[in-house]
Amino acid sequence: MKNIWLMTAAVSAVVVSCGTVQSLVQNTFPYTANVLVSTGVPADKEVSSTSTATNVQTWFGGNNNAKIKDVRISDAKISVVSPSGGNLSAVKSVKVYVSSSGTGEKLVASRSNITTDSSSLNLDLNDTGYLDEVVKSSGLTVRTVYELKNQTTSDMNLKIALNFNSVPAN
């Protein structure tokens, strides 16, 4: 009986430590896209802006043999870069899609009915499943679709910051 308890304790310790090790080796890698909102953009009309990832490409892009798996979106944020002191009060909604060569577009984050005067805002994450194929393919592209409540009086630069999580592949 004593051996059974010792064996159970040992197995429990191994299982807990394996989970701890996996969480310690989990990778997080960023992607940022800049979106220019011009003064000529009309209110109440969806507008699309596309950006190709260069920083994610240096991590894994185009390398289907990259030793990562279970890639998911872990964080998405929109913020005003300029004008200085600008806020998101003119933005009504935003949707962020990712795709790459040979993959379909996936909605990874969005926010509707934005009602903040803040200069930054966390976006709601969409459960898109694993994004391994998208991130490991070449030409990762982020398409941002936004809609304004009213026309801006000056150009506004927005930054979309995405973080992806993955774990090492065997």
Image (cartoon, grey):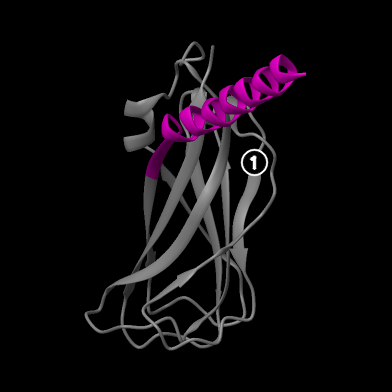
Residue 19 among magenta residues: yes
Q: Which residue is identified by label 1?
A: 105
The residue lying at 53 percent from left, 49 percent from top is 74
Instruction: Kindly indicate the quadrant of the structure image that contains residue 95.
Output: bottom right
- Camera sees residue 126: yes
Seen in the picture, residue 167 relative to 3 is either above or below; the reply is below
Residue 150 image point, x, y percent = 51, 88
Residue 134 makes an appearance in the image: no
> Which residue is pictured at 49% across the width and 86% down the height?
116
Check disc 1 and give the amino acid type: Glu
Q: Which residues are magenta?
A: 1-30
Quadrant of the frame with the C terminus: top right
Relative image position of residue 84 (x, y in whole percent): 21, 80
Question: Which residue is located at x 43 percent, y 24 percent?
Answer: 61
Instruction: In the rendered view, tell whether residue 123 sits above or below residue 119.
Output: above
When the figure is inspected, residue 108 is found, relative to residue 129, above or below; the finding is below
